[in-house]
Structures are given as structure tokens and as C-alpha cells.
Amino acid sequence: MAIIILFFIYGLAFGSFCNVVISRTRSEEKLFLSQSHCPKCKKDIGWKDNIPVISFLILRGKCRNCHKKISWQYPLVEIATAIIFTLIGYFYTIGSIDNLLVAVLYSFVFACLMVVFVYDVKYMEIPMHAMWLAIGLLVVINIVNDISGGSLQGDFWHSTTFTHSLSALVAFCFFFGLSYISDETWMGYGDAFLAIAIGLLLGPMATFLALMVAFCVGALVGMGLVVAKGKTMKTAIPFGPFLIFGLLVIFVVLNLYPTFMDNFI
């Protein structure tokens, strides 16, 4: 139980860091060489006002210096990241810590995807530095899983490294084709790289299911915006967050129900 609590605490901390990455990627500030500061009054934020979630509640959602409102993005990202980290810790460390390294790597992957999710929602653009880091980590995870399972010394063609890489390639080609044919009006090139991450993490059939979830939820949200807010069918909506949502749904389902994919084979 203690390790699950640690995953939650680290999730809050990484969620706070994700907010910094999102903010500084947009403003092109250096990531590590300057202290956290209020985006409105630019004054430095002290450590006691920089505690994830707790400081937001104590300050009642306002900057201590200029008293302007702090975006709800900050506590929501921190809580969401903490929940995802906790789930990963539960899936991979309960009963045994043999998979602790994989759990930590998956946590880093989803922290990167959190940055991509929020940045795409806010700015309709996928930050490629976070995307490439997630892809690199997933390649490492697949190799680690195959080494620990002995797949790389056996039948390589059925190894996670090969099957998931093939899935990533097919998913990339599909989304890249949509982007190219439509000149990025249907889909952006960034979504094609996000599809690589989905393929690397989930593998062939699970990737297909994640994409189906993404397309279905995206269609429902799009129709809801048309009805509720008067948007048109030509209104641009970032698709990256739906892809990440689909990925997360299938990832959770597969870990809760390991035999789930048997229904599709």
C-alpha cells in the first residue's frame, strides 16, 4: 500500500511539472533554469505556494501577489496525473515489485502524454519534444519486457518489440495518409506520431480498439458542440486528446481484465 501512496504523491509532483512544461513550451522559456512564477504578474512563486493542489486550495485559486485567478488547469492536471500514476502503481507493483522499473517508465510515458493532451486542447498543436520522449520510452519498455520474458532470444516475430512496432507503423501510415490527403484538414501530422505511441503501447488489436474509442468519443463530442455551442461541422477540433483518451481507456481495461483481448481473437 505504501508504494501506491508514493505513486500518488509522485503523480502530484509530476503533474505540477507537466503544467510547467506546458506553460514554458508555449512561452519558449527555459525549462529548468528559472523559478516558477505567476504567468500574470511574473513574480516568483515561493515553495509554500507551489505545493500541488494544496496551495491552490489555500490560496483559493488566486495568486498571492496580484490576486488574479489561477487557472483550474493546474490542480486538474495534478490530480489527473496522480490518479494515472496510482493506477499504474496498482497494476504493476501490487503483490510484487518485479515490474517496478516498467511501472516507473509507464508513469513517465503518461506524464508526457498529459503534456500532449493539455497542450493540444489549449493550442491545437502537439509538442513534439514530449511526443518523441514518450515514443522513446515505449521502445525501451517493450525491449525490457521482451528481455525479462525471454522473447528476444526466442521467436522474435512474436515478441512485443516486433508486434507493437509493426502496429505503430500501420497506425502511423493510416494517420499520415489522412493528414496528407486532406492537407491536415481532417487530421494533423502530429496525430500520426501520437498513433505511433498508441501502437507501441497497446499492440495490434488493442490499438484498433483504442482508435475506435477515440473516433466514437470524438464524433459524440463534435456533435455535442454543434448542438450546444452552435459550432459547425467545419469547426476545427483537436483530435489528439481523443486518441490519448482511447489509449488510456484500453490500457486500463487490459490491466483490469487481462483476458479481455481473448474476445477478439
Image (cartoon, rainbow, N blue to C red):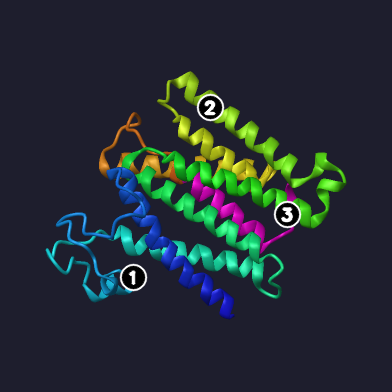
Type of the residue with mark 1:
Val
Judged by depth in the image, the label closer to the viewer, 3 or 2, is 3
Residue 228 locus on image (x, y percent): 29, 45
Type of the residue with mark 3:
Asn
Along the viewing direction, whichever of 182 and 45 lies nearer the viewer: 45
The residue that disc 3 covers is 145
Q: Secondary structure at mark 3?
A: helix
The residue that disc 1 covers is 53
Q: Residue furthest right?
A: 154
Magenta-colored span? 242-265
Along the viewing direction, whichever of 224 and 36 lies nearer the viewer: 36
Mark 1 and 2 residues: CB-CB less than 8 Å, in contact?
A: no
The residue that disc 2 covers is 176
Residue 47 locus on image (x, y percent): 29, 71
Q: Residue furthest front?
A: 33
Along the viewing direction, whichever of 48 and 216 lies nearer the viewer: 48
Any part of residue 197 in sight: yes
Bin the neighbour count of mark 2 within 10 Å (Cα to Cα): few under 14, some 14-19, many 20 and up: many
Q: Is residue 250 left or right of residue 56?
A: right
Is residue 32 shown above or below 197? below
* Marks 1 and 2, how far apart at CA: 39 Å
Q: Residue at x 21, y 73 (%)?
A: 59
Q: Residue furthest left?
A: 66
